[in-house]
Each structure stands twice: as structure tokens, then as C-alpha cells.
Image (cartoon, rainbow, N blue to C red):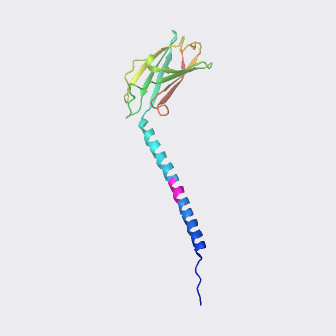
Amino acid sequence: MKRKAISPLIATILLVVVAVALIAIVLTWGKTFTQDSLAETTDIIDSSCSGAHLNVSNCKVGTDGNITFYVKNIGTTYTFPLTDEFMIDITTDDSKDSTNLNLTNYATWAGLGPGQMVQVDMDLSNLGGKDISSGTFFDVTVRSSVCPTDAVATAKNCHR
């Protein structure tokens, strides 16, 4: 009995198909591996703001048109650097607002370590070019420029 082997043409085609399948598997794995590694790297970078937490309290509006409130670092490990320009957004109950005001213009600023607090005094009569002193209630939001998603706090319904 005479045995027949696979023709060289069919053998070559089978080798090419197996090689293409292996390449597709390796590329798919490599793409997933790279994306997962990049996501972990991004998480590591974002953890630089770990522990950055703020609180805004004792918000009072005086009859003289000044608003006073306190910004406290309630985190236990993160120190806000001197270069951090906290941004303040003030919104009134009648939808007037003043946004992205730099806290360093209204408070003595030397950084903010864990547990430290700074008093902010602002004249509302002509804030940021807008007269917002006529509102009855104010919401004050303070946001870190270094950690804008982690360190943000709002005091609601500050009033005269």
C-alpha cells in the first residue's frame, strides 16, 4: 500500500494560517496588556493627590457686604503647597455668580498642612466685576488648582 503525504502547497497554506492565527492572538493579548498597564500608570499618577481633602465652614455674610469663611485641610497626610492657587466660585440664590477667583487675593496664604485652616474675607459689593451683593443666600465652592477633582468643598446657603 502506497501512502500519500500532504502536498507542499497545502502544507504551506496551513503554516501561513497557523502563523496568522498566532500573530492575531499575540497582538490581542499585547493590546490588552498595554491598555491595562497604562490604566495602572494613570492611577499611580492620580494618587499624588491622595489625602487632599478640604472643608469650607463658618460662612457668614456681613451687612457691610463682606463674606467670611474658613478653608480647612481635613486630610491627614497631604499638604497643599504654597503654589496651589485655590479657586473660589460664589453663586447667589438669584443665579449671579463669580467664578475662578484666586484665594490668594483674599487671604494670607502660606500653604495648608493637615489640620490647618485659613480665614478668607471677601468684599461682595463688586466681586469680579459683578455686583452680587444683592443675593440673599450664597454658595461658596473652593477648589484646589493642583488637585481639582480631589480637593473641592462647598458651603451652602451662606446668608446675611
Looking at the figure, which quarter contains the C terminus? top right
Q: Is residue 82 left or right of residue 127?
A: left
Magenta segment main secondary structure: helix
Highlighted range, magenta: 25-30
Q: Is residue 54 left or right of residue 2?
A: left
Q: Residue at x 55, y 68 (%)?
A: 15
Quick one: 1 or 80, which is closer to the camera? 1
Residue 58 x %, y %: 47, 21
Q: Residue at 50% across / 54% down in the picture? A: 30
Which corner quadrant of the image does residue 97 belong to? Answer: top right
| Residue at x 57% of width, y 70% of height | 12
Quadrant of the image containing the N terminus: bottom right
Residue at 50% from the left image edge and 17% from the top image edge: 60
Seen as rendered, the residue at the extreme top is: 64
Q: Image quarter for residue 139?
A: top right
Residue 94, position as x, y percentages in the image:
62, 18
